[in-house]
Image (spheres, rainbow, N blue to C red):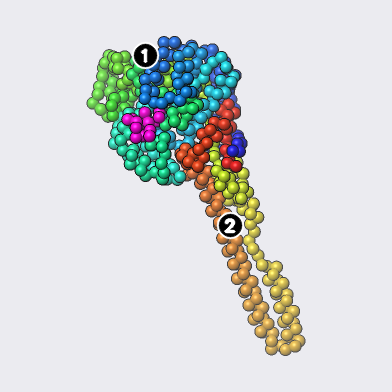
């Protein structure tokens, strides 16, 4: 495997906020605590005083969540290590995408693995555990119910409502039957697990268990007890709205805020139901239901049944940091952007703010696609250009010039002129015949010129079609592979796809990774 790196800025595929962050632009410095480089973690470790009693709660809950799951030795070791005060987590989170969804699901977890490994080398007295926070409480089923494999989209139809992690896996057999071949890990997970959350844990354990990745489901009554005081204060004082709105005022001088903050940033969560909580006068209502509460009732609910309160996108990070001894959160560009809206929120609740890391991005070039690119004479970086610009570049490489037989026509014209002069001397009656033959010759050359140009055009069309097909392989639907292609698109032909990613990714290098089969 040939591994190379590109500057994020050179790809043209990343936002100005992300690029400014990576170059440590002073405009962004007020919105985070520590830039994520290895040296910064000394301060992060020192400042992260995580209560021992909370560690015990975490370990006991994780042990419960992993009941019935065959634990790889690395996962078992990490679960035990989390009880120790010198152990910290490196966390990434994502929705429960069907069959892991787009590749960036995989890239996030691999980045967490490599970050933990790099920190382990730098700080051997501590222990670093990569964690996948399962977005089990998410209710946007349309975002997770499909995946694209070899250019075809497969969709799981379900009438279930509420938190997707609680969805029954019933009905997934029909989708499994549609796939081009058997995928045992996924088939076992989806047919032997009762819920989508359990199935996703089984899949991640199968793919990444050897690297010690721990999966955590935040949809837990036990863990929600830690979030209960935050939820109660949010309901009473609307702290999130005040803190984030203040941050947004400063941030939007330079960038558009990524996510919207609500007056109350909480959902009511129950079986088949996850709906926003809103306040109207003295009454708290659950949207799209008949449920209403007084302030006393809603606060009592948050205290006595905390599992029925679900954080939204801006409160979930706070919840995460309350239940994990976490040092860094790894996310994509959009996640990095909305974390910058949250520093004031963390300060308001006096919760340590972790390092915010951009996950690794990558392009995987198969041997066949690499050969096509080489044949076209294009570089990887050139492939990031728009198609019209690429076509222009290809035309230059092909040295395309319209075929012209003008010189030949002039030569033929000179020859027939000489013949005409000879005919004039020998037999003037033949001059017209010579002229006719001259015209035939010119017509023949003109016809040949058209045929030659058509042949060139046909040849170029073939080359252009090869370019278009290659562009679609490397940028399906016009975007990065990682936003469309599924893991199985590459792992099916390369069982070592994930180990190759683990070997190639350098989380602290902050560059775009290119993996090319040799």
Q: Quadrant of the C terminus?
A: top right
Q: Are marks 1 and 2 in contact (CB under 8 Å)?
A: no
Residue 430 in percent (x, y) is at 69, 87
Give the residue displayed 39% in from the left and 23% down from the top.
66
Disc 2 target residue: 460
Q: Depth check: 69 or 453 in front? A: 69
| CA neighbours of label 1 inside 10 A, class few (<14), some (14 to 19), many (20+) | some
Tell whether 216 sits left or right of 456. left
Residue 32 in percent (x, y) is at 52, 21
Q: Depth check: 430 or 372 in front? A: 372
Residue 494 in percent (x, y) is at 51, 40
Q: Depth check: 437 or 397 in front? A: 397
- Whether 496 is among the magenta residues is no
Give the residue displayed 69% in from the left and 70% down from the top.
408
Element class at badge 2: helix
Disc 1 target residue: 229
Above or below for 431 versus 257: below
Element class at badge 1: helix
- The residue segment tinted magenta is 188-202
Tell whether 432 sits left or right of 294. right
Where residue 411 is drawn, which disc sits there? none
Q: CA distance from mark 1 to mark 2?
A: 68 Å
- Whether 200 is among the magenta residues is yes
Tell whether 474 sits left or right of 269. right
Would residue 347 be visible to someone looking at this image?
A: no
Above or below for 431 versus 294: below
Give the residue displayed 57% in from the left and 41% down from the top.
517
Q: Quadrant of the N terminus?
A: top right
């Amino acid at each position: 495997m040939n591994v190379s790196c590109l500057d994020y800025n050179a790809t043209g595929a990343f936002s100005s906020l992300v690029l400014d962050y990576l170059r440590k632009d002073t405009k962004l410095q007020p919105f985070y605590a520590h830039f994520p480089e290895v040296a910064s973690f000394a301060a992060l470790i020192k400042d992260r005083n995580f209560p021992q009693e909370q560690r015990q709660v975490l370990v006991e809950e994780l042990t419960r969540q992993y009941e019935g799951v065959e634990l790889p030795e690395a996962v078992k070791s990490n679960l035990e290590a989390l009880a120790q005060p010198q152990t910290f987590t490196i966390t990434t989170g994502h929705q429960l995408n069907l069959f892991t969804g787009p590749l960036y699901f995989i890239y996030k977890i691999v980045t967490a693995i490599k970050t933990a490994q790099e920190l382990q080398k730098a700080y051997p007295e501590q222990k670093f555990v990569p964690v996948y926070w399962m977005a089990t409480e998410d209710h946007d089923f349309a975002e997770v119910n499909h995946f694209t494999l070899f250019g075809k989209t497969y969709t799981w139809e379900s009438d279930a409502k509420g938190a997707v992690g609680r969805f029954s896996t019933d009905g997934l057999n029909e989708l499994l039957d549609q796939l081009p071949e058997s995928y045992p890990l996924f088939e076992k997970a989806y047919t032997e697990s009762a819920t989508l959350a359990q199935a996703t844990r089984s899949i991640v354990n199968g793919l990444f268990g050897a690297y010690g990745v721990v999966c955590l489901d935040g949809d837990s009554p036990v863990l929600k007890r830690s979030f209960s005081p935050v939820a109660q204060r949010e309901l009473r004082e609307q702290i999130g709205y005040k803190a984030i709105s203040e941050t947004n005022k400063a941030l939007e001088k330079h960038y558009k805020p990524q996510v919207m903050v609500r007056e109350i940033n909480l959902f009511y969560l129950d079986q088949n139901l996850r709906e926003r909580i809103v306040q109207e006068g003295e009454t708290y209502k659950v949207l799209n239901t008949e449920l209403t509460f007084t302030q006393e009732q809603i606060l009592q609910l948050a205290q006595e049944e905390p599992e029925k309160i679900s954080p939204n996108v801006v409160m979930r990070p706070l919840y995460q940091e309350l239940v994990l001894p976490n040092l860094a959160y790894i996310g994509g560009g959009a996640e990095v952007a909305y974390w910058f809206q949250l520093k004031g929120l963390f300060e308001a609740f006096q919760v340590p703010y972790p390092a915010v890391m951009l996950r690794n991005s990558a392009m995987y070039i198969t041997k066949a696609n690499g050969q096509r690119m080489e044949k076209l004479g294009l570089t990887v970086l050139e492939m990031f250009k728009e198609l019209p610009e690429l076509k222009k570049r290809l035309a230059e490489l092909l040295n395309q010039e319209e075929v012209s037989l003008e010189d030949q026509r002039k030569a033929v014209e000179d020859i027939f002129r000489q013949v005409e002069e000879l005919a004039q001397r020998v037999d003037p009656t033949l001059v017209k015949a010579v002229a006719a033959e001259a015209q035939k010759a010119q017509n023949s050359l003109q016809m040949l010129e058209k045929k030659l140009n058509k042949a060139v055009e046909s040849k170029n069309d073939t080359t252009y079609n090869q370019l278009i097909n290659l562009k679609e392989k490397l940028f399906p639907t016009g975007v990065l592979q990682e936003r469309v292609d599924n893991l199985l698109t590459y792992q099916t032909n390369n069982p070592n796809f994930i180990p190759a990613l683990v070997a190639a990714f350098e989380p602290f290098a902050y560059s775009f990774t290119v993996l090319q089969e040799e």
